[in-house]
Amino acid sequence: MLVSFYPDPVTTTGQTLDLPEVLTGIETGRWRAEVEAARAVVDNKAAYAAAKRKLPCFTTSGTFSTRKAEQLLAHSGLLCLDIDAKDVNAAVDLVAARQAIEGDSYTYAVAASTGGVGFFVLVPIPTNDHKGSFRALAAYFLTEYGVAVDRACQDVSRLRFVSYDPTLYLNERAATFEETLPEPARPASVPPVGAGQWRPSARGEGYGQQALDRACDKVLRAADGEKRTVLNKMALLCGGYIAAGFLNEAEAEQALQAAISRREVDDLPHAFKTIRIAIADGKLRPVLPPLLQQHVHERLRSGAGVDAVATALAASQGLPVGTIEAAVKVAAAEVEEAVPVLAFWEMVPGSAKRDPPMKLVLRLNLLRQFLARHGFRKLPVGQKVRVVRQVEQVVHEVTRAQLKDFVLGYVEDLPFAFDGTYRDRVEEQVQAQHRMLFDEGTSEFLPTLGGEFLRDTAQHAYLFYRNGVVVATKDGPELQPYGELPGLVWAEQLRARDFTPLSQEEIETGEFFRFLWNLADKKPERLRALLLFIGYYLHGYKDPSNPKVGVLLDEGMGPDGQANGGTGKSLLFEALRQLVPVVAIDGRGFDPRNSKELQEVTDATRVVFFDDWAPSLSFDRLFVYATGTLTVDRHYVGKQSYPYATSPKFGITTNGVLTGQGGSHDRRRYEVEVSPYYGPHRQPRDEFGHNFFSEAWSAHEWSRFDALMVHACCLYLGTGGRLAAPTSVGLEQRRLVAATSAGFVAFMDAQPRGQKLYRNTLISEFRVAEGYTEASMTPHKFGGWLNTYKKLSTDFQQGQDGDAGSRGQRWIMLAQPVVNEVTMAL
């Protein structure tokens, strides 16, 4: 990185130096005395200019034969940007802006300017389009940091005076800013468009149309849970524009109806009613477009009367005076009120020496205090922090985008004028400085979230509904108000519906109960097993002495030991999702070696289930998740560990059988088989006429479902948290086939009972029957299969014939089958 260095700005032929050498001189104070002498007279324009003429200088963007752009010898690959405390930057906190810019991956170096007020930034760029790079960087810095750069920097031969800055920032690994922008074309002359011409056009001109477009966009982007609030606010705003004459009421209503119709809402007719009522309310308070409203405020403050302002404005916009006058009167009332706000900004004197105008300055410390007052907190996660918002006892996780939306939403709700400034000016400053205002530093200085999160106990489970907290115990559910909660709750745990206790008879008329009854093959003991399965997962408490992984599998079996699937197993976990936060993972594509597989797990997650767990994956891989500390590795966040007590429970559905045997497997599995009532031949939708958990469910159907699920939780708590293995229908047979082969099982089942079966004879006959060779079916392998058959199929004796001293032949004897007493009686 070579540059041309000059003893003063008058000299046009310089010496070639390495740029890092010059930067080191700025940092270590090589020219400190001369620079500080210039800074001492910075307020005296003539004296400061004279002092600068004595300073050395250099061309940051390359070396030159003489100091002219056309005499460039070699570009340094750097562009220098000057950021001064004037013009647009007068309202910017340059200290905070510099800190944010130093964190940018494109920043090579940052140092104070010669005068000590502003600073300069060096950015690596391609060497083929200096001016194009400047245009792109100027736009980038204005958008990202809200700062304007000196346009003279587009001159590749521009001089940079030496400075002194012991805090000079240097990043030798800075990325190259590749973007360039072409020189803008001169705009064609077009006739002005009247502000009252709101109707749609190819370019969407018109104050009213622009306001309606923004309103519809906000409705389309509104978060779930906020759609009705946003719709009401936007309809109110449109009502104000209608009253002022900038919008047509019928078309505004139709546009808002079209926007909300594209969203999933519970009651669309009610949403349409909200639009009509809010528009009518908004018409009671006419609203002017921001530019016109600012003009009106300034005219009124200068002493002009309401009538004069309204007449002039109506004439300029081509609207009736009576319509405009109502909006001007509203503005006059706002001027009279002069509401003080000063939320996270200050009004400070400008730079003019005589009657300086007050300027708006956003303050980071005030922003942090403002956010803290509104419940925003930091939650440490490893080496990083997350931003959350506590509203009473409910904690919401907040993204950076949501934090921006909250601040902008707060500003949008303010009066048009306050604190000697305007709402639009605050919005512009927030948007221009968003990167500085909402970087990680903002969250790190928020107060830490206090209090403990509410967790289920061995005897209690907490389920959160709109009308209160359901406390489930072995004695049944009890609905309690949120004010009595002894801890914090994650917002993801709250359900946006009411809970209604119902009788057992009423519960059994519900669709989901009938669905479970079908899965249980209409057998009470199998229904109980399914309900205990549900109750186990609704109860968030984890007994360290009895960890379980629930397994849902099919009763039926194909010739390969695999079931067809599609029997409704996954719907049980989908049912759990309606009450507690659940993370679903595709078991077929699960790779336990990938540390990011569980990154969707959060602090609020209560259940993780693997849908369609691949039989080729060993059940041993779930042991670490189910019985120990769970480590979650998230993109851009890092690792977070959850101790066993606060980690989620794990469950799986599978069409096969789980590999692995032994006591540890038996203790940790709770396997429940579902009947083949549903499958490719019949789906729940075919029977009930719609999907579960959809808009087709009435409020009463939801009540029956919720009452059933809570009943399942209470039923589980009544067992003392102990799950007894349900009666197996065909599981052991499937496991036997999976561990050996269907042909082997059929071969052994055909052998006579109660007599000696010699192994040598058995293996020979089996090889012939199934087409095995001696190499493919060794005595060792066959013996292992026999032991598996013994364990999973039937008891048998084994021994060895022969005289003492001889090896003899090994044999087994299969036990006689147990005959059902009822059958014998018949």
Image (spheres, helix red, strand yellow):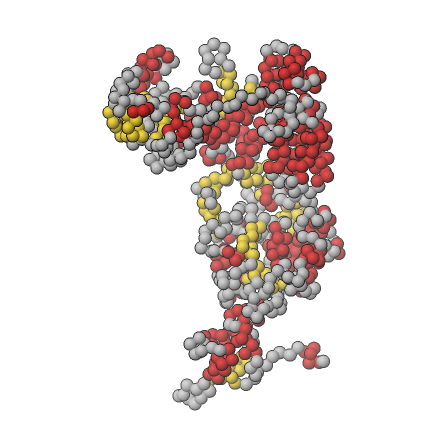
Find residue 18 and report its horizontal and vertical position in percent: 27, 30
- Image-based side of 153 in relation to 252, left or right: left
- Quadrant occupied by the C terminus: bottom right
Taking the spot 45% from the left edge, 11% from the top edge, the residue there is: 353
* Residue 162 lies in quadrant: top left
Find residue 457 and report its horizontal and vertical position in percent: 59, 51
Q: Is residue 429 visible?
A: yes
- Image-based side of 379 in relation to 493, left or right: left
- Quadrant occupied by the N terminus: top left
* Residue 81 lies in quadrant: top left
Taking the spot 70% from the left edge, 49% from the top edge, the residue there is: 696
Q: Is residue 718 visible?
A: no
Find residue 384 and report its horizontal and vertical position in percent: 45, 40
- Residue 100 or 183: which is nearer the viewer? 183
- Residue 700 or 206: which is nearer the viewer? 206
Q: Is residue 705 placed above or below 428 in the rendered structure?
A: below
The residue furthest bottom is: 803
Q: Is residue 456 placed above or below 84 in the rendered structure?
A: below
Taking the spot 59% from the left edge, 81% from the top edge, the residue there is: 816
Q: Is residue 264 placed above or below 722 in the rendered structure?
A: above
Find residue 167 and report its horizontal and vertical position in percent: 34, 28
Q: How many marks?
A: 0
- Residue 455 or 298: which is nearer the viewer? 298
Taking the spot 70% from the left edge, 64% from the top edge, the residue there is: 522
The residue furthest left is: 15
